[in-house]
Image (cartoon, helix red, strand yellow):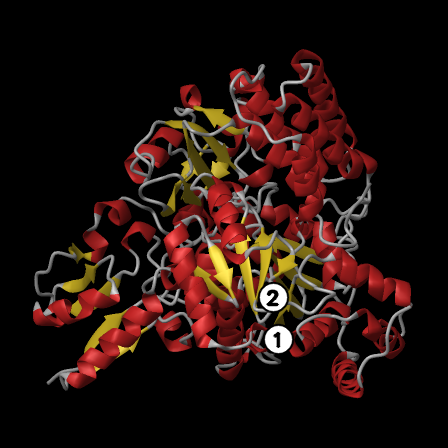
Amino acid sequence: MTTQPTPTEAETVRRIVADMKGRPGPLLEVLHAIQARLGHVPESIVPLVAEGLNLSRAEVHGVITFYHYFRREAPGRHIVSVCQAESCQAMGAEALTEHAKRRLGVDLHQTTADGQFSLEPIYCLGNCACSPAVMIDGRLAGRVSPERFDTLIAEAKGAGGDSRKLRRQ
Amino acid sequence: MTTITVYVPRDASALSLGAGEVADAISKEASARGVPIRMVRNGSRGMFWLEPLVEVVTPAGRTAYGPVNVDDVPGLFAAGFLNGGKHPLSLGITAEIPWLKSQQRLTFARVGITDPVSVSDYVHHDGYQGLRRALSMTPEAIVQAVLDSGLRGRGGAAFPTGIKWKTVLEQKTPQKYITCNADEGDSGTFSDRMLMEGDPLALIEGMTIAGIAVGATQGYIYLRAEYPHAYRALNNAIAAAYQARYLGPDVMGSGKRFDLEVRLGAGAYVCGEETSMLESLEGKRGEVRVRPPLPAIKGLFGQPTIVNNVMTLSSVPIILHRGAGFYKNYGMGKSRGTLPLQLAGNLKHGGLVERAFGVTLQEALYDYGGGSASGRPIRAVQVGGPLGAYIPASQFDVAIDYEALAGIGALLGHGGIVAFDDTVDMAKMARYAMEFCAVESCGKCTPCRIGSTRGVEVLDRILKGVDTERNVRQLEELCELMLQGSLCGLGGMTPFPVQSALKHFREDFGPRGGVETAPASASVARAAALFPSGRQET
């Protein structure tokens, strides 16, 4: 069974749905707005979205789970996406990914125990002339060596910001 | 003291190399020295090994310095770079740099030159001349001009653009749509991103012309979520175009309406397929539609819809402005006009090269690309993204043109070129192609959904050296089945990289004596890790 959304979450979702339901084909827009506000799309808000947009819960669930971008669990404070695509592979993405896993102590799709970093695979950031590429909290980095990766992680930690509030403004 | 104009790119790739920090450092140093400067954040010229590329306007022309690090900034001031002073990072007059000078930039004419979100700068550089011309023409004449230019879809399918437009024009319905496919997901491609960040008004103008031509009043740009910089640039440019009345109820005082908005994708590669993109724009799962009906007849929300790539639509303004004949004069055979090639992967000089069709792969890789970045021999090149064939060095003399590449069993796709040096393991690349398809399959048809997963398994056995001959045969049969039986290009073209790797690099698929391979459990765990929860298909 899914848990109930918190009153704040419910209010946020209701407001987003009310704002957007008049737009053509609004579901993806609504889910983007929810993730931008809550950091993820919790299972518990599915009934609210379904009811608000006059869709079945199955339809909403189906859309959330189809798209890689929508996350159903709360991510770490910082989201680290390492490109896995061919151009980056040609410039050592595999080794960089292994380094990232070791450095953060997690596998892909996992979050560090202290909740600081989520490590994600991504398939092309359009930075292919500067491979390998990494994106941390929406900030793109090119020609990332293992040393540069460590610097970026240290910077993200130092910056202290919260990726959940920075993405997709 | 006169104010000197300094250009520092806002292009995402330039920013990924520190352009933002360099721009800040220049502004700070200038104000500390009491020197008035005007800072323009332009697009990138596309010479990414020289980014961050800083340009200064001098009486002799725009003078370039690069690649500039924050630490270089005080030295540049000391050398008098604001007056074009000599410095170890001097590159001379930007337009005279041979790499750039030898190009034929039509679609990218303004990228890296103008302020991307300034309508007045755009107009000053021939912007909105195409729309102006279009507004004086009949819809039929606009469509005919696009047809006569020979422009073919730059997204990969290379379908004649004018024919699509003509079909939509002929539909007698009150609501039609112009949609732009900006889901540029192919590895090795970034031309759409560069243009949307560096000259978004060209795309906006192209879509407006399309709307005027076929009688559509609403446009959507379907942009991938991985492009936050392009998202901001497009939204800023759209707002500026509304402000200047190039969008809205009365486009350029013509009394004609055209509205435009950006919609974000959500990380699904298959949504670059046009019918899947339409489903996604409607807010649904991006599952491929069965054709017919064609989108031109029954597309977005069931209405006649133009679906064109960013490059295609951005090439329209110059065709209308300079005429179909001007554009058609570039190119060879049935590939007319210019192609923005993207040099990526293991190349010394990666970047954007726009030339008429017909440049050879050899020229692209060595004359422009400068050979491999690692200094090792280039062994394989993948052209056209993850669904494109791998091409061996013996075929680098092929001309980059739709038909010539098809002639060697390859494809041009969106014009991305990814180079690999001789350390590449082509059996692993074949496995990756199948794995990518398994991760990205929309799940609608069985050959793609199940076939790709079986493909990964067969390749894992080959990589472990298990019963190689039989497994290679099985892989070949599987490829044939996916090719013949898939609903769209994802399953239907995933065999291309696999088959070409088998054909040209067969030695990598043999018994793997001494080669370290992952144990079965590790590869299963890796495959599982690649499926986010809820997407596991089998």
Q: Position of residue B155 (x, y in %)?
A: 57, 47
- Picture quarter with the N terminus of chain A: bottom right
Residue beneath disc 2? B212
Q: Position of residue B217 (x, y in %)?
A: 67, 70
The residue at the point 71 percent across, 44 percent down is: B528
Name the kind of residue labelled 1 in the image. Answer: Lys
Residue A79 found in image quarter: bottom right
Looking at the image, residue A128 lies above or below residue B375: below
Residue B248 found in image quarter: bottom right
Who comes first in sequence, dot 1 or dot 2?
A: 2
Image marks 1 and 2: residues in contact by CB distance under 8 Å: yes
Q: Chain of mark 1?
A: B
The residue at the point 36 percent across, 51 percent down is: B105
Residue B199 visible at all = no
Residue B429 found in image quarter: top right
Circle 1 Cα neighbour tier, 10 Å, few/some/many (<14 / 14–19 / ≥20):
some
Image check: B348 left or right of A15? Answer: left
Residue beneath disc 1? B256
The front one of A31 and A163 is A163
Q: Which mark is residue A48?
A: none
Q: Secondary structure at mark 2?
A: helix
Name the kind of residue labelled 2 in the image. Answer: Ile
Circle 2 Cα neighbour tier, 10 Å, few/some/many (<14 / 14–19 / ≥20):
many
Looking at the image, residue B130 lies above or below residue B513: below
